[in-house]
Each structure stands twice: as structure tokens, then as C-alpha cells.
Amino acid sequence: MHGFRSSFRTWGMEATQYPDEMLEFALAHVVGDQTVRAYARSVMVAKRRHLMEDWAKYVTSRIE
């Protein structure tokens, strides 16, 4: 499981323009300090949907 999560994070950093915060949020990691979390209440559902669709395309594509 850790390898799959690591692969997602590496792909997100190297092959996309998604913000680090969104990638971490998608991995269910805590982002920011207590003050940042108090004001950042969005769960970014629409943006995360696009991120996950891009990830699905990547992992299901054939590399030749």
C-alpha cells in the first residue's frame, strides 16, 4: 500500500501541476498547522475528482 501511495505522490510531483496541498490532502495527510486547518474547510471535491481521473488514466495506460 505504501508503494502505491508513494507512486501517486511521485507522479503528482513530477507529471502534474496539482498543488502539493491537494496531493497531500488526497493522501489523507494533515496539511498545514492548526491555524491553516481552522480556516481551510473545503474538501476540494471537484478538484480532487479531476486529480483522481488523471491518476486513473495514468495507472491504466499502457506504457510501451
Image: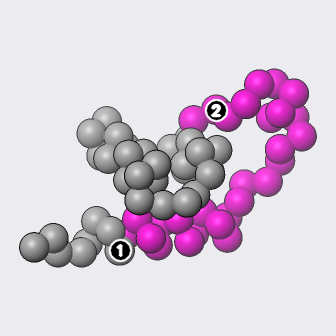
User: In the picture shown, does residue 27 fall above or below 2?
Assistant: below
Check disc 2 and report its element: helix, strand or loop: loop
Q: Name the mark on residue 30.
A: 2
Closer to the camera, 46 or 10? 10
Q: Are marks 1 and 2 in contact (CB under 8 Å)?
A: no
Marks 1 and 2 sit apart, C-alpha to C-alpha, by: 26 Å
Image quadrant in which you'd find residue 17: bottom right
Classify 10 Å Cα crowding around label 1: few (below 14), some (14-19), many (20 and above). Answer: few
Majority SS type along the magenta span: helix
Q: Name the mark on residue 57.
A: 1
Percent of width and height locating residue 51: 53, 65
Stretch of the chain drawn in magenta: 29-56
Identify the residue shown where x is 87% and y is 27%: 35
Identify the residue shown where x is 28% and y is 65%: 59
In the image: residue 40, left or right of residue 5: right
Q: Is residue 31 a member of the stretch shown in magenta?
A: yes
Looking at the rendered image, the quarter that the C terminus falls into is bottom left
Identify the residue shown where x is 77% and y is 25%: 33
Can residue 52 be seen here? The reply is yes
Classify 10 Å Cα crowding around label 2: few (below 14), some (14-19), many (20 and above). Answer: few
Image quadrant in which you'd find residue 45: bottom right
Q: Name the mark on residue 42.
A: none
Identify the residue shown where x is 26% and y is 72%: 60
Q: Earlier in the sequence, mark 1 or mark 2?
A: 2
